[in-house]
Amino acid sequence: MGRKGQWKRLSATFRDEDRNNPPLWVHCASLGEFEQGRPVMEAYRQMFPGKKILLTFFSPSGHEIRKNTPLADYVFYLPLDTPRNARRFLDLVRPGAALFVKYEFWYFYLTTLKKRNIPAYLISARFRSDQPFFKIYGAPFRRMLHCFTHLFVQDGSSLNLLSSLAGSSLPVTVAGDTRFDQVAGNASRDNTPDLFKELVREPVLIAGSTWPRDEVILERLAGEIPELQLIIAPHEVHPSHLSSIARLFAKWDPVFFSAVKEGPQPKVLIIDTIGILSSLYRYGTVCYIGGGFNPSGIHNTLEAAVYGKPLVFGPNYKKFGEACDLIRLGAATGFRDYKTCLEALRPWIKDPSLREKAGRAGRDYVLKNTGATRLILEKMRQFD
């Protein structure tokens, strides 16, 4: 269905809604931002059980996967950012407050919210000096910052950048990253399919969100460490990609998880279902985080670190602060190629004490950095 007919659906949905109980509007660009916003939505539900939540996405990947999430009462695409669309959308929805996650800056929506005195919040934001806000030509971008009732940033460097703006009186709080709360919450619940638990054997390398260059390295590892079980959860689960993985690992008779009914435990297990990766990391001896050879960089390291697992990942990790922190703490290793991957992996596979020390450092790091959700909700209550 996509965006077609969405104005008609918006109108039909909100025409008869109680205007005395306006929804919280949460906007996420895509799936990653949704996961960052998830703990705040969960906590908001508990704090205000009678309130409703409107969730919007810009990306089809987020909308299609989370359009039936129980966290939201309504899920829509966000109409394009134009003056007319912003007025029309807010006329229909009439939110009590708006919550934007991480990097969401929509000029006409934000300025219209400001004109209507509707509180707007930015959460889990990170700012860099190369962004337009801090350039000579950045006046329109800076204007958007002043539309927020409060900005919740991840770190002190973001706070310092915002404070450096001439005449800045922005309401900013260093709250941290809500992803720490999200992964800690996931770790407290074991949603792993029972069948998966029967298929795992030690030692096992769980490789999440992999891409083709990752998979070439994993294939060589399978031959180099005969006792190692490989569980591969590719980022893309298109049939063509799954088939190419099966061909690459053909000598080990790989098994697709969706096709398994019972044991035996395979040498190579390919996860061809969506939505279970974060719980699978719990069962890894070591975890491999994919994406390190892509320009966009590695995927979520915290999902595995929270379980006390050592991590390895490819070279494109430096723009991710948590990955750099995990390396500094000895909980992860970034590698350049197959040889350096093997050198990083082998000691953790062979030595339980080294593995435990590294894993504990990663888990402690995650737990130490929780609490952003509580701080955000406490501040939002002041404007409720």
Image (spheres, grey):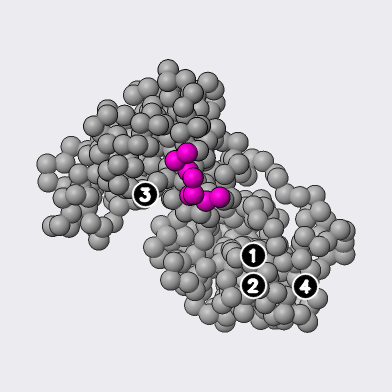
Compared across the picture, whether 84 is left or right of 30 comes to: left
Question: Depth-wise, is mark 1 or mark 4 nearer the camera?
Answer: 1
Q: Distance between the residues labelled 2 and 3?
A: 32 Å
Q: How crowded is mark 2: few (under 14 residues within 10 Å), some or many (20 or more)?
A: some
13 and 232: which one is in front? 13
Residue positioned 46% across, 33% down in the render: 11
Q: How far apart are marks 1 and 4 (CA)?
A: 15 Å
Q: Is mark 2 on a helix, strand or loop?
A: helix
Which disc, if any, is residue 241? Answer: 2
Residue type beneath disc 4? Pro
Q: Where in the figure is residue 13, as x and y percent of width and height?
A: 51, 32
Residue type beneath disc 1? Val
Q: What element carries label 4?
A: loop
Q: Is mark 3 on a helix, strand or loop?
A: loop
Q: Distance between the residues labelled 4 and 2?
A: 14 Å
Using the rendered image of the protein, determine whether residue 357 is visible from the camera's viewpoint: no
Marks 2/1 in contact by CB < 8 Å: the verdict is yes
Question: Depth-wise, is mark 1 or mark 3 nearer the camera?
Answer: 3
Residue linked to disc 1: 237
Residue positioned 28% across, 56% down in the render: 128
6 and 51: which one is in front? 6
Q: Is mark 1 on a helix, strand or loop?
A: loop
Q: For the magenta stretch, what is the residue range? A: 1-8
Q: Where in the figure is residue 20, as x and y percent of width and height?
A: 42, 17
Residue type beneath disc 2? His
Using the rendered image of the protein, determine whether residue 34 is visible from the camera's viewpoint: yes
Residue linked to disc 3: 80
Residue 254 in which image quadrant: bottom right
Any magenta on residue 286?
Answer: no
Residue positioned 33% across, 34% down in the render: 120
Question: Depth-wise, is mark 3 or mark 4 nearer the camera?
Answer: 3
